Amino acid sequence: MQMAQPSLILFEDEHLLVVNKPAGMNTHAPSPFAGEGIYDWLKHREPRWSTLAIVHRLDKETSGVMVFGKTPLANRTLTEQFTQHTIRKTYRLITDRPVKFERQTVISTLVRTGEKYASRPLHAGGERAETRFRVVGTDTSSFTSLEAEPVTGRTHQIRAQAAAEGFPILGDLLYGGTEAARVFLQATGLSLKHPATGAEMKFNAPVDFEAETRLALREALIDARETNAYRLIHGAADGWPGWYVERLGGFLLSQAEQPPTVSQWDESRRLMNLCGARGVYHKILTKLVRRTGVPQASPQLILGETAPDSFVIRENGAQFELSFKEGYSVGIFLDQRENRRRWLTNHVAADFHLFPKGVAGVEVLNAFAYTCGFSVCAAKAGARVTSLDLSRKYLDWGRRNFALNQLDSAAHDFIFGDAFEWFRRLAKKGRFYDAVLLDPPTFSHSKDTGTFQAEKDFGRLVDAALPLLKPGGVLFASTNAARLEPETFLETLETSVKSAGRKNVRQHYVPQPPDFPVHRREPAYLKTVWLRVA
């Protein structure tokens, strides 16, 4: 299924992919289990981007033009152009410190000192770092805008040299800049020769320092025509520790362990007006959901209009029914949006097609189906889906989601009951599946099989599910158990597969999506692995 392209794409042909990287996103993932960088996110998103290569980098805090190579020819020629300094890069920056020149060329050596680099006088054996600075504007507020053209391409070059010359970039706390909403540095232009034709090419990303960093990141990666449900604020990573706000179509959902503070209330009102939302609801995050009645557990209106009993949101072109009146869960978990999309595109990651011959006709078992979000996407792609859940209410909700997407629920199976019990029954009946989806709640209790805790029982779940998976089938395993470390989770899956006398022939680990950014104070919690099991 052809999906709409994110707005950050500036240019693409057979050899090149040029993007406008949003601030707040690394060039590549800083570690195996952290959030994806722009490179990782792109590389695994579309089959035609699976050969992407990094030929230069931008700091996480820096926005603007980046080029990736798609072919060996492009990688080689672009690397040569960067090495020979024939590619011209231009940046725009703002400082609030006095600038005593109109034009200045800074030549120095950069020496690493902890997390940053110090600009030192050029000396024998030191690598040359050269940047041309030019003042392009000042205003009455003592802000100065400068253009920077780095002749060389050292790490933190512009930031370190600007600070050493007495005009650190606004917002660049690492280099002594004044605190601001972001680092006011943007790669505005890139000029290069096309790797195949040799033609001169110029790419530009006009600077917009007024745009809010967290909103600009979402707008760059999420196509509003296809999706109107995503996370707007994700705790500490977006400057609001312990507070989470989601856009759900025409409404916003605020979530915290306490009622909203005055500042959260004010920010909710601002976001409601900015997004054109009709109302804002607030949900108290609690671990005592089972002891709370539906009315008390349900989100409560705090601003604007009352939502109807149910309303519809759009995600990657699919539609889903939500409700603020059905208890703690509103009907969808947005952190699985990218994984649901993988069913629609039949593409898991670079060199990992979900099914080489397509999804049409494959048999899928979606255990812990909830309101059948994964089931809908698999069915839209052509699969025949069995949805299994411990709640009749959620399965009925799932059937309504099928109807919303013009899917005949009668052509698919909906099974009410305990997953472990039904795994045994299905195995006895000789039912086998091309894919098995395991996304259980962190904690649950069944009369048939007792208590399930993801952090200690996930291996037992995989052991029970593997007999239903056809040879060469795909196992999807996901958990939001924060205390379960990624390494332990992967080891658990590997142990279960080996114990069953089977083998992983392809594996891809997926962190939480970019609108759920990772922060030291609030590390990654969602862990997902796609496995092809022989």
Image (tube, helix red, strand yellow):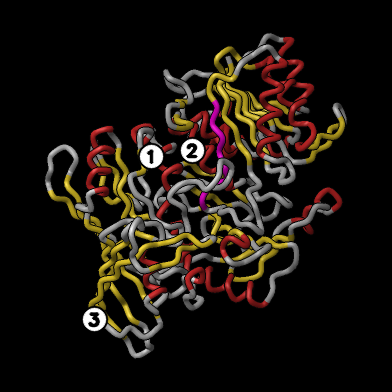
Which residue lies at the image location 84% right of the left edge and 33% below the top edge?
Answer: 446
**Picture quadrant where residue 375 is located:** top right
| Residue linked to disc 3 | 102
Which residue lies at the image location 29% right of the left edge and 60% below the top edge?
Answer: 205
Magenta residues (range): 507-514
Residue 89 is at least partly visible in this image: yes
Q: Marks 2 and 3, how far apart in space?
A: 50 Å
Which residue lies at the image location 66% right of the left edge and 47% below the top edge?
Answer: 525
Along the polypeptide, which appears first: circle 3 or circle 1?
1
Give, as a three-letter code, the residue at label 3.
Answer: Glu
Question: Any mark on residue 97, and which?
Answer: none
Q: Marks 2 and 1, how far apart in space?
A: 9 Å
Q: Nearer the viewer, residue 467 or 265?
A: 467
| Residue linked to disc 2 | 341
Give, as a three-letter code, the residue at label 2.
Answer: Arg
Magenta stretch holds residue 400: no
SS at mark 2 in the image: helix
Tell whether 479 sits left or right of 454.
Answer: left
